[in-house]
Image (cartoon, rainbow, N blue to C red):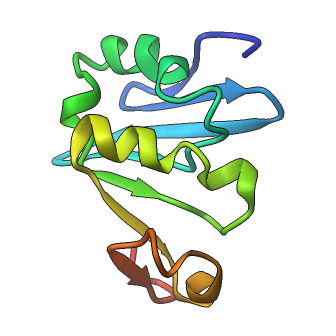
Amino acid sequence: MTADFVEVTPNILMVPCDFVSVVIAKGEKLAVMDSATATTMPQAILPALAHLGCGLADIDYVINTHGHWDHVQGNPALVAASGAKVWIPAAEMEKLSAVADHFLADGEI
């Protein structure tokens, strides 16, 4: 990890993790977009969550943009710590069908 996080807006933070970024968005629900690698989660996002006044247990959703390993390996650690639901695009169903709670359709969020 190169920096703790970058504040995009007051409720949207970007967390650099190795060679990918994780985005955390806080609204009515708390979502983590992409979960990076197993070696970075959940420690990499703790400072960003604290900045938002949240902890791991507050995560409602882990939303994966696609099924590449460097975007989904952290899912199990985040789900174990929070009970979050995992959402992925429906087109990624074959790659991640065993780890998703909901398949996103285009334009759904």
Residue positioned 61% across, 64% down in the render: 65
Using the image, determine if residue 86 lies above or below residue 28. Answer: below
Q: Quadrant of the N terminus?
A: top right
Q: Position of residue 16 (x, y in %)?
A: 69, 26
**Left or right side of 85 for 98:** right
- Numbered disc total: 0
Q: Position of residue 27 (x, y in %)?
A: 24, 44
Residue positioned 33% across, 47% down in the render: 79
From this viewpoint, which residue is outermost toward the right?
19
Which corner quadrant of the image does residue 21 belong to?
top right
Residue positioned 57% across, 50% down in the render: 34
Which corner quadrant of the image does residue 17 belong to?
top right
Q: Quadrant of the C terminus?
A: bottom left
**Left or right side of 68 for 47:** left
Residue positioned 39% across, 40% down in the render: 78
Q: Position of residue 10 (x, y in %)?
A: 39, 25
Q: Name the one closer to the observer, 12 or 102.
A: 102
Using the image, determine if residue 54 lies above or below residue 33. Answer: above
Using the image, determine if residue 30 lies above or below residue 106. Answer: above
Q: Position of residue 51 (x, y in %)?
A: 35, 12
